[in-house]
Image: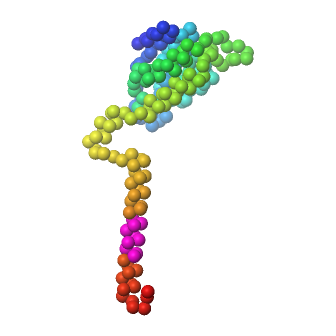
């Protein structure tokens, strides 16, 4: 799939590499990647890696990458959400020949735009997923961690109040049964 705008040409490989549970448990992960081709062009893809990529090595190829979770599954929807920072990033990219003073970068780009893309990617991954709600629905309602802490505090307050009431009743009974105490 290719997306074209007036100043940006994205080649999008929306096929996500399969990540099995066994692979995830043994250290495999996915990375979201943008290969900055310069002149307003880029290639967007995800890849499966066993070890984390190294920024310097990838910059030699003009590739920026960011780790994504195993549940990441909708590249096209994410790209729609992050269209503006992606446009800024791609438009800012300029391919260059590595020189003595810049051996590791085949591309110069707007670092702030890349940070906005990765921030959007992190937020996208943290959003509530409809599939998670569907899976949880048959099990009934579940409290969120914040709700659990509130319920725990309420429970502790209730237990303390009950303990105070029992203690007050015992003391009253003791006082009532012993005529010498006031």
Determine whether, in the image, residue 180 is placed left or right of residue 88: left
Considering every residue shown, the one lying at the far right of the view is 100
**Colouring:** rainbow
Counting every numbered tag in the picture gives 0
Look at the image and tell me whether residue 15 can be seen: yes
What residue range appears in magenta?
Answer: 159-168
Residue 80, x across and y down, in percent: 43, 20
Q: Nearer the viewer, residue 1 or 113?
A: 113
- Give the residue drawn at x 40%, y 27%: 73
- Give the residue drawn at x 48%, y 28%: 121
Determine whether, in the image, residue 176 is placed left or right of residue 51: left
Considering every residue shown, the one lying at the far left of the view is 138
In the picture, the quarter occupied by the N terminus is top left
Query: What is the chief secondary structure element of the magenta stretch?
Result: helix
Q: Nearer the viewer, residue 137 or 165?
A: 165
- Give the residue drawn at x 40%, y 80%: 171
Residue 22, x across and y down, in percent: 41, 35
Res 151 quadrant in image: bottom left
- Give the residue drawn at x 66%, y 11%: 97
Res 4 quadrant in image: top left
Q: Is residue 104 magenta?
A: no
Q: Is residue 62 above or below residue 127?
A: above
Q: Is residue 162 magenta?
A: yes
Considering every residue shown, the one lying at the far bottom of the view is 180
Residue 62, x across and y down, in percent: 58, 16
Residue 89, x across and y down, in percent: 55, 18
Q: Is residue 71 above or below residue 137?
A: above
In the picture, the quarter occupied by the C terminus is bottom left
Look at the image and tell me whether residue 75 can be seen: no
């Amino acid at each position: 799939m290719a997306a074209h705008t007036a100043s940006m040409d994205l080649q999008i490989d929306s096929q996500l590499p399969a990540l099995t549970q066994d692979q995830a448990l043994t250290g495999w992960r996915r990375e979201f990647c943008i290969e900055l081709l310069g002149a307003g062009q880029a290639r967007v893809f995800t890849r499966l890696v066993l070890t984390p990529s190294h920024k310097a090595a990838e910059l030699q190829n003009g590739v920026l990458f960011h780790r994504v979770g195993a549940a990441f599954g909708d590249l096209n929807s994410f790209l729609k959400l992050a269209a503006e920072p992606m446009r800024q990033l791609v438009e800012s990219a300029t391919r260059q020949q590595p020189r003595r003073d810049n051996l590791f970068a085949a591309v110069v780009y707007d670092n702030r735009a890349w940070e906005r893309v990765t921030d959007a990617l992190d937020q996208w991954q943290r959003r509530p997923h409809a599939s998670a709600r569907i899976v949880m629905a048959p099990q009934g309602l579940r409290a969120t961690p914040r709700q659990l802490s509130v319920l725990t505090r309420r429970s502790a307050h209730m237990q303390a109040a009950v303990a105070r009431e029992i203690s007050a009743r015992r003391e009253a009974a003791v006082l009532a049964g012993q005529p010498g105490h006031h």
